[in-house]
Every structure is written in C-alpha cells, then in structure tokens.
C-alpha cells in the first residue's frame, strides 16, 4: 500500500470558500454586536482597532500567505475579539469572545461549500483502510465548526488546526506533530493540497509524498514539483492516485 496515510489541506482542496473582510456591512453589523455588550464602536473605529489588535498579536511572526479564508492562522483569533471588548472597559469571557469571532466569520463568508466529490473521496479512502487526516492553517473557532457543518468531521481520523497547535504549514514542526501523535512514518504519508509552498514544499521537507491540485483559490504561483500535479480541481482523479497500490 503506497499511500497508507492521507493528509489533506482544507480550503482550496476539499472546501471552496470566499470571504470578504473588507465589506463595510460586516463592520456595521459587528459594531452593533459589540454595542449589545456595552462596547461602543463606530464601524470604522472597530475595523481599525481590529487590524491594530491582530498586528499586535502577530508581532514577530513571519507570514508566507495572507489568505482571508485562513484568517490569521498564526494566532488564536478569539483573543483579538476579547481585547476589543477590553479596550472599551468590558471584560468578555471566552464564550463571548468565541461567539463574537464566529459572528465575524459568518458575516465575512460569501459562500462555503464542498468541492464535487469531497465526501465520496474521503469515504473511499476510509473504506480502503487508509488513515485520513486534516492539517490546515486555520482558526479553531471557525474551521472546527465549518468541518462539522459540511459533514466532514467523522471522516477524519484526526484534525490539526494551526491556531490550536501553535505552528502552521510549511513549518516542519506542524507536520511532525501529526506524525508523532499518530505514530505515522513519513514514507507512508501523502499530503494533498492546493498551495505549492505551504502544502507541497512543507510536506516534501519532512519526507511526505505530495499531490498538488490547482484550484480556484490556489495562490498565483508556478506549478510545484509535487509527485502528482493536477492543473484543475478533480477529486475523482485524486482518489485514483491515492488508491493505487504501487
């Protein structure tokens, strides 16, 4: 069995998503929500304060990508929302900070949907006895709920999200965390993703095989040197690759 353990990226690989954090209506509604809890902001004041707070939390971090759908994977984003309450003298508990962040995510999401064949692919892999894992640069308070809402949660053997793990792709530590906790040898693992740097180069550096899919939200970059390269989204073809015995 060549690919015994299949590690997937999420956004742009299994899930198609479009978010818009610049929408003025988002900040109007979010400012109203903060006002419900006595934290009074104008929409522009809140937007500026949010980006200032995120920048402070990210101080010292280096970033290869700035994708809105990942939404600052380097930090636990709920802390930013909690700080915005504190700036107005309101001590928000963790549930309120999380709910505020989730409201922000809902407001900023124009659509989220599975790519054709995503469920079928994961089911085929599970039925064939493959290990199936998620390794995503993503926010725990957003992505864990989106994975459940899309029906993907029971199809993964384990889920690793960068904001909860304290590291992100292409950092080798993120890949090795999965390998060590799941007791997986890297030569048995294949990474499937749509980003040539974070998914493919990162996985190759720790000894994974790689499958690259150029999707509608892949970064604009040359095709990477993956073991398999798909120039368009085709999860049925990914299944044929992963289920080959040799």
Image: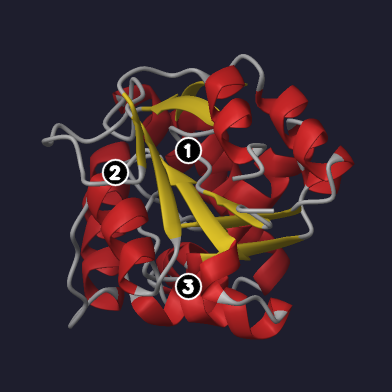
In the rendered image, the vertical position of residue 24 relative to residue 7, given as above or below: above
Count residues near mark 1 (Cα–Cα under 10 Å), then give few for <14, some for 14-19, many for 20+.
many
Count residues near mark 3 (Cα–Cα under 10 Å), then give few for <14, some for 14-19, many for 20+.
many
Task: Please give left or right for residue 6 compared with residue 49 in the image.
Answer: right
Q: Position of residue 67 (x, y in %)?
A: 29, 43
Q: Position of residue 246 (x, y in %)?
A: 59, 45
Using the rendered view, name the quadrant where residue 75 is placed: bottom left
Q: Is residue 175 visible?
A: yes
In the rendered image, the vertical position of residue 241 relative to residue 203, given as above or below: above
Task: Please give left or right for residue 91 compared with residue 199 in the image.
Answer: right
Using the rendered view, name the quadrant where residue 203 is placed: bottom left
Q: Which residue is mark 3?
A: 175
Badge 2 or badge 3: first in the primary sequence: 2
Q: Which residue is mark 2?
A: 67
Q: Which residue is at a point 54% across and 29% down the rendered structure image?
A: 238
Q: Is residue 91 visible?
A: no
Instruction: Classify mark 1: helix, strand or loop.
Output: loop
């Amino acid at each position: 069995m060549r690919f015994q353990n299949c590690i997937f990226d999420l956004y742009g690989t299994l899930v198609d998503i479009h978010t818009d954090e610049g929408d003025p209506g988002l900040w109007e509604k979010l400012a109203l929500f903060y006002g419900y809890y006595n934290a009074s902001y104008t929409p522009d004041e809140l937007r500026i304060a949010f980006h200032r707070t995120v920048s402070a939390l990210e101080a010292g971090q280096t970033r290869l990508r700035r994708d809105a759908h990942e939404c600052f994977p380097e930090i636990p984003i709920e802390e930013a929302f909690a700080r915005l309450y504190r700036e107005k003298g309101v001590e928000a508990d963790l549930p309120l900070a999380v709910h505020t962040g989730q409201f922000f995510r809902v407001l900023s999401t124009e659509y989220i949907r599975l790519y054709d064949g995503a469920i079928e692919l994961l089911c085929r892999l599970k039925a064939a006895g493959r290990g199936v894992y998620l390794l995503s640069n993503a926010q725990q308070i957003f992505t864990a709920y989106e994975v459940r809402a899309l029906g993907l949660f029971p199809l993964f053997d384990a889920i690793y999200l960068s904001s909860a793990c304290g590291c992100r792709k292409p950092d080798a530590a993120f890949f090795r965390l999965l390998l060590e906790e799941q007791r997986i040898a890297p030569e048995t693992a294949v990474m499937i993703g749509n980003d040539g740097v974070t998914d493919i180069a990162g996985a190759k550096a720790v000894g994974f095989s790689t499958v690259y899919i150029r999707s509608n939200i892949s970064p604009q970059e040359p095709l990477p040197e993956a073991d398999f390269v798909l120039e368009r989204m085709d999860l049925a073809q990914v299944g044929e690759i992963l289920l080959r015995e040799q």
